[in-house]
Image: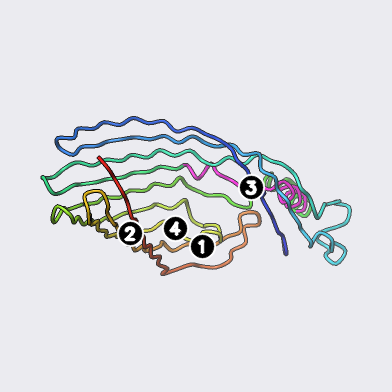
Amino acid sequence: MNGYSLNIAKNDAYGYMAGLAYVKPEIGLKAAITYRSEIEHDANYAENMPFINRYNLNPNLPPSLRLDSVQTEESELTTPKSVNIDFQTGVNKTTLLTAKARWVPWSDFKITPPLLKTNVVSATNTQAGQVVIDNANLLEYGDDAYQLELGLAKRLSPALAVSGTVGWDSGAGNPVSPLGPTEGYYSVGVGAKYNFTPEWAVSAGAKYLMLGDAEGVLAASGKKLGTFEDNDAYIFGMKLSYASK
């Protein structure tokens, strides 16, 4: 796989979203569940494995394998479905409790470029003299991902409201891809919204993520790339909004 490169062309595909919601305005209650479907793409993979051109320098890759080094081919790529639950309710006239939950079956998601699969499977099984693997993925996840977040919002005046959140994300298994070397996270967030007119408002927020430690591994070969520990992430955002009743 030394020198392997991949380009996946841009591709549009469609799925659907469906959900149910319940609202009770007098106590600030809103509850909703939303399902987003899988989306199947016919992806165009352009791959290059230059090391294949040098088999004669590598006794582990005999020319009799007849492996291709360059290929462009279309293959299916399916992005996962998800289920989201959103809930909020008033605690009193100026305080709001919020909760969110999300499930994504990342364990079903794989990126399997056709040339990478063919060459890795063929070379591995030939060297071993038996069928060792029947698939080689560039990216795969071991577990489904779960996410929870709890929040509290407080209106301090007719124009100013503040909020805070705590959250947890399970991650999608360990070891992980070097493209995303974290195993979930814990988060803490704060935010504020100020209405400088009845219609116009400015919002600002920040979130700190304590990223989970993880082992980075190449999915196709199982080669360990390193350990990722004690990492953090910071998110900042601002929004200017207009709402007319």
User: Which is nearer the eye, 11 or 143?
Assistant: 11
Given this view, does label 1 or label 2 mark the residue nearer the observer?
2
Q: Secondary structure at mark 3?
A: loop
Badge 2: residue crowd in 10 Å (few <14, some 14–19, many ≥20): some
Task: Decide: is 56 above or below 145.
Answer: below
Query: Disc 3 or 1, which lies upstream in sequence?
Result: 3
Badge 4: residue crowd in 10 Å (few <14, some 14–19, many ≥20): many
Badge 3: residue crowd in 10 Å (few <14, some 14–19, many ≥20): few
Given this view, does label 4 or label 2 mark the residue nearer the observer?
2
Say whether marks 1 and 4 touch (CB < 8 Å): no
Left or right of residue 197: residue 1 = right
Amino acid marked by disc 3: Lys
Q: Quadrant of residue 157?
A: bottom left
Left or right of residue 28: residue 67 = right
Say whether marks 1 and 2 touch (CB < 8 Å): no
Left or right of residue 128: residue 184 = left
Q: Secondary structure at mark 4?
A: loop
* Residue labelled with disc 2: 187
Q: Residue at x 47, y 47 (%)?
A: 143
Given this view, does label 1 or label 4 mark the residue nearer the observer?
4
Query: Disc 3 or 2, which lies upstream in sequence?
Result: 3
Q: Quadrant of residue 100?
A: top left
Amino acid marked by disc 4: Glu
* Residue labelled with disc 3: 10
How far is the residue under mark 3 from the one under mark 2? Answer: 32 Å
* Residue labelled with disc 1: 215
Left or right of residue 207: residue 98 = left
Region rendered in magenta: 105-123
Amino acid marked by disc 1: Glu
* Residue labelled with disc 4: 183
